[in-house]
Image (cartoon, rainbow, N blue to C red):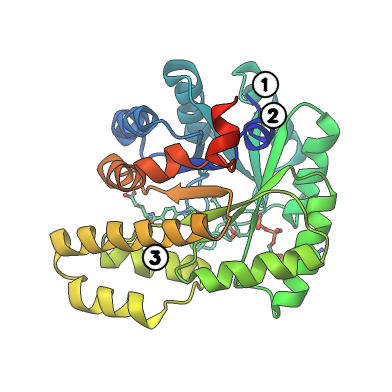
Amino acid sequence: MKISEILNSRPLTASCEIFPPKKDADFAGVQHAAEEIAAIGPDFISVTYGAGGGTSRNTVKIASHIERWTGVTALAHLSCLSSTREEIAAILQELREREIENILALRGDRPTDGAPVGNHYEYAYELVREIRSAGDFCIGAACYPEGHIECPSKEEDLVHLKQKVDCGCDFLTTQVFFDNSVLYSFLYRALAKNIDVPVLAGVMPVTNAKQIKRICALSGTSLPPRFRSIIDRFGDKPAAMKQAGIAYATEQIIDLIANGVKGIHLYTMNKPDVARAIFDNLSHILREIDGLPASVREQL
Ligand SMILES: NC(=O)C1=CN([C@@H]2O[C@H](COP(=O)(O)OP(=O)(O)OC[C@H]3O[C@@H](n4cnc5c(N)ncnc54)[C@H](O)[C@@H]3O)[C@@H](O)[C@H]2O)C=CC1
Ligand SMILES: Nc1nc(=O)c2c([nH]1)NC[C@@H]1CN(c3ccc(C(=O)N[C@@H](CCC(=O)O)C(=O)O)cc3)CN21
C-alpha cells in the first residue's frame, strides 16, 4: 500500500525504522528483528540505506521480506550520492518487481572512509524528480528541524526543503530530535514556506551511550540538559539507561501527540523489545486517538 494512502486514511500513524545488516552473516538476525517489529503492528516499517553510506542490496531484500511475509507496508530508503543514473534505474526496477511502492529519496551521507562519490547526483531533489517522473512510487524525503549539519543556516535549509518537496515528495520524515519545541518551531516555519505535506516526527529511544555519540556525529542534533543528565547519570549502566531511554521517548511521543502531531516515526535501532515497550506504554493513546469526539465516533 502507498504510505500517502495510509497517512490520508488515519488520524494518527506510528511507524518504525530499522537498518539493514552491514555484513551478510547478520542478515538472519535483522530479518528476525524485522518480523518481531512487524508483529507489534506499526503502520509501516522503513529500512535505511545503512548509516554513513552502504548499499541498496540488503535494504531491498529486508524491505521485500517485510512486505511479503508480514503484510506490513515497507518503505525502502534510497541514497543517490554514490550512484549512477543507470544504477538508480536498476534499483527502481527491482523495487517494482518486488512490489515495493514506497521510497525515501535521500542524497546519502558522505562516506567517512574517503570512498569516491559519483557525479550523477548532487542533492536529493534530483532523485525525487527522477522517481516522480517514473510515475509509480510514493516518495518520502528527509527534513531537518535543527537545519542540516552541512547547511550554514536553517532558513537556507528550508528553501532547499521547499525545492525538494516541489519536485514531488508525498511526505517527510524528520531527523532525530530530543527537544519537542525544536520540532514545533520547525513545523511553524515550514508551513510559512508552504511546505504542506505530512511530516512524520522521528523519535529515537537512546538506550546506550555509544548510540548517542554516533547519532550526534551524523546529525549534529542538540541534547537538552534534561536528556544530557540522563546520559551522564545512566550512560554506563546499561539496564538503567535502557529504562530511562524508553521512558524519555515515551514522554516525548505523548507530548507530540497531545500537541497534534499526526505521525510518529520510531528509530528502533533494530531493538524489538525497546519498540514493544514504547508501543505498550502508548497502547491506549494510539488506539483511542482518532481525532473525533466520542459522540461522533459512536455513530460511525
Ligand atoms: N541513510 C538513511 O537512511 C538516512 C540518511 N540521512 C542523511 O541525511 C543527509 C542529507 O540527505 P538528504 O536530506 O536526502 O539531502 P538533501 O540533498 O536534501 O540535503 C543535503 C544538504 O544539501 C543542501 N542542499 C539541498 N539542495 C541544495 C541546493 N539546491 N543547493 C545547495 N544546497 C542544497 C541541504 O540544505 C543540506 O545541507 C544525508 O547525509 C543522508 O544520508 C537522513 C535520513 C535517513
Ligand atoms: N545523517 C543521517 N544518516 C542516517 O543514516 C540516518 C540519519 N541521519 N537520521 C535518521 C536515521 C538514524 N539512522 C541510524 C543512526 C545510527 C545508526 C548506528 O548507530 N549504527 C551503528 C551500527 C549499529 C549496529 O550495527 O548494530 C554504526 O556503528 O553505524 C544507524 C542508523 C539512520 N538514519
- Report the quarter where the C terminus lies: top right
Using a 10 Å C-alpha cutoff, classify the residue at mark 1 as few (fewer than 14 neighbours), some (14 to 19) or many (20 or more): some
> With respect to residue 32, does 159 lie above or below?
below
Residue found at the very far bottom of the displayed protein: 225
Residue at mark 1: 96
Disc 3 under 8 Å from ligand 2? The reply is yes
Q: Distance between the residues labelled 1 and 2?
A: 6 Å
Residue 177 in the figure: left or right of residue 5? left
Q: Where is residue 178 in the image (x, y as percent from the top left)?
A: 44, 68
Residue 252 in the figure: left or right of residue 236? right
The answer to whether the residue labelled 1 contacts the one labelled 2, judged by CB atoms less than 8 Å apart, is yes
Using a 10 Å C-alpha cutoff, classify the residue at mark 2 as few (fewer than 14 neighbours), some (14 to 19) or many (20 or more): many
Looking at the image, which residue is at 50% across and 46% down? 54
Element at badge 1? helix
Element at badge 2? helix
Q: How far apart are marks 1 and 3 (CA)?
A: 33 Å
Depth order, front residue of 288/199: 288
Q: Position of residue 198 (x, y in %)?
A: 68, 48
Residue at mark 3: 214
Looking at the image, which residue is at 81% across and 44% down? 168
Element at badge 3? helix
Depth order, front residue of 98/143: 143
User: Which amino acid, mark 1?
Assistant: Arg
User: Which amino acid, mark 3?
Assistant: Arg
Residue 39 in the figure: left or right of residue 5? left
Residue at mark 2: 92
